[in-house]
Image: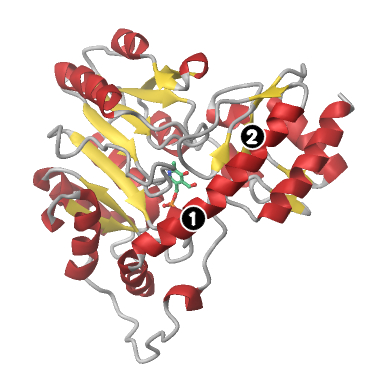
Amino acid sequence: MKIEPFRLERWLLEQAEIDLGGGGVTKLQLKDILPDFDLSMVMKYGRTDGSDELKSLVAEWYSVEPRNILITSGTSEANLILNLTLLEAGDHYITENPKFEQTTRFAEMLGCKVNEFNLMENKAWTPDIDELKEAVTGKTKMIFLDNPNNPSGAVLSKAELKAIIDVAEDSGAYLHCDNALRGSELSGKPGATPYPEYEKGVTTGSISKLGATSPRIGWIIGNEKLIKRCWEMKDYTTLGHSGIGEYIAVELLKQRDRLIKRNLEISKRNINDLDNWIKMSAGTYWRPPDAGFTGFPGYTAEISSEKLCRGLLKEKSLLLSPGSYFGVEGHLRINTGSTSDALSEGLERLGEYLATL
Ligand SMILES: Cc1ncc(COP(=O)(O)O)c(C=O)c1O
């Protein structure tokens, strides 16, 4: 297998004084959720499909049953297992664009033929359903959504999701929704996901965007038969997820409402600040996000987003992520889950740099 670089992940390793390259909220400390960590905990494998307690907490969040859930090592392993379980070389795969490129790149590496349909920026990043219909072929095995969308922050309405489900159903394709950004919707209500409404709908997600990336706990949600097949595949990937991670995830999900409130306060304040900055800055524009911890403004300067980001890093020690890494040129991804100070300093440096172009 030829390994395609996952450009964003390597880019995010760059060091900068101001780091607004990522797409998550300011991380929690362990003591914020577990002041009395149980040091007598035995460090053994747990159930490889996830403990009943953790599955029940996830099931409650998604209004499904625990048997519809497989616990994984983050959304990343969930996406990997799902693709390894369902995709074969020669399958046709459709992804929305812009998107977080992990899943699509991996489908390509498995030998799938990949086509895209766009979220239309001039229509508030809503999906181009006609383009999706045109992309479908007799070999379409999977349609992929990144919802809430990373980087644009758009959230599909129920009607839009239904229109996509109809296309998937007509073609017999699986509909995979990467739901890593669940809980970041500014409305306070989780966006719609395809399972159980659609039997071949499947959702992946994790606790990472609640503010805890290091426990590495995520999940796959789908019909029981698919979950069993994915579990069989997991025996060959990691066998078991982190037991300590699972212990932390249980506590975190019990405190979900409080954490979501904290996270929304951070992102709403930052989105408001970014909106004010964009309104006052010549040469930038955006459609404010409905969710998530990323803004995805466009700029008018004639320079590629990668070159612009490299220049910002070198000249201003500011890390932003190039739009091209998400499939849309002429845009920058800016973290709206950062501290207020980092955002305001970062925007000042961005403004100074754009003025030199
Ligand atoms: C849309 C999306 N999917 C998956 C991931 C990976 O997340 P996890 O930490 O759950 O593996 C991310 C991380 O930024 C993401 O934004």
Q: Is residue 335 visible?
A: no
Name the spot of residue 65 as percent of width and height, x first.
Answer: 12, 54
326 vs 335, nearest the viewer:
335
- Residue at image point 23% right, 62% down: 57
Label ID, residue 275: 2
Q: On screen, 256 above or below 139? A: below
- Residue at image point 36% right, 54% down: 206
198 vs 110, nearest the viewer:
198
Q: Is residue 10 left or right of residue 209?
A: right
Nearer the observer, disc 2 or disc 1? Answer: 2
Question: Is label 1's Cβ within 8 Å of ligand 1?
Answer: no
Q: Is residue 342 left or right of residue 208?
A: right
**Mark 2 nearby-residue class (10 Å; few <14, some 14–19, many ≥20):** some
Q: Is residue 294 left or right of residue 45?
A: right
| Quadrant (top left, top right, bottom left, bottom right) of the N terminus | top left
Name the spot of residue 91 as percent of width and height, x first.
Answer: 28, 23
- Residue at the bottom extreme? 40
Q: On screen, 231 above or below 353? A: below
- Residue at the right extreme? 356
| Quadrant (top left, top right, bottom left, bottom right) of the C terminus | top right
* SS state under label 2: helix
